[in-house]
Image (cartoon, grey):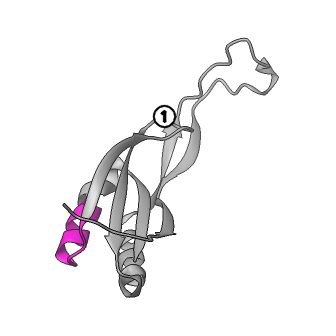
Amino acid sequence: MKLIMAVVQDKDSNRLSTALVESNFRATKLASTGGFLKSGNTTFLIGTEDIRVPKALEIIKENCKHRDQLVAPVSPMGGNADSYVPYPVEVEVGGATVFVLPVEEFHQF
């Protein structure tokens, strides 16, 4: 058995949740916040049999897309202002960060 932890952008979470349910995957959704952009994410915890991991990864890949977004930089507080860029910067966001972990035991009460 495996535990899949997938961190996805909030914009992709509803689409991913629907696709997982349609393929009979159970998932727990947790609200999370990214450290770089400090924007909302959703972390999915998906427990599944080893043989179904490739299908789950395929669903995640199909439903979590990269996109470009303009981000206003945060001004440095007491830091080095030499590298500070005072105008919005375009960065790539979205997609999914996925961890697949082994599960020694699973209990449902």
Residue 23 to residue 15: above or below? below
Of residues 49 and 55, the one drawn nearer to the viewer in this rendering: 49
Number of other residues with Cα within 10 Å of mark 1, as a class: few under 14, some 14 to 19, many 20 or more: few
Name the outermost residue toward the top. 78
Residue at screen point 38% across, 70% down? 105
Report the amino acid beneath label 1: Lys
Coordinates of residue 104 in the picture (x, y in percent): 44, 71
Coordinates of residue 93 in the picture (x, y in percent): 50, 51
Q: Quadrant of the N terminus?
A: bottom left
Residue at screen point 49% across, 41% down? 34
Residue at screen point 48% across, 45% down? 69
Query: Residue 28's quadrant in the figure?
Result: bottom left
Query: Residue 109's quadrant in the figure?
Result: bottom left
The residues colored magenta run 15-26
Name the outermost residue toward the bottom. 51
Residue 26 to residue 77: above or below? below
Q: Is residue 102 left or right of residue 29?
A: right
Of residues 70 and 78, the one drawn nearer to the viewer in this rendering: 78
Residue 100 to residue 43: above or below? below
Coordinates of residue 16 in the picture (x, y in percent): 29, 64
Determine whether the residue tagged by mark 1 lies in a helix, strand or loop: loop
Q: Is residue 89 left or right of residue 105?
A: right
Q: Which residue is mark 1?
A: 38
Coordinates of residue 37 in the picture (x, y in percent): 52, 37
Query: Residue 78's quadrant in the figure?
Result: top right
Of residues 49 and 106, the one drawn nearer to the viewer in this rendering: 106
Magenta span dominant secondary structure: helix
Q: Is residue 48 magenta?
A: no
Residue at screen point 24% across, 56% down? 14
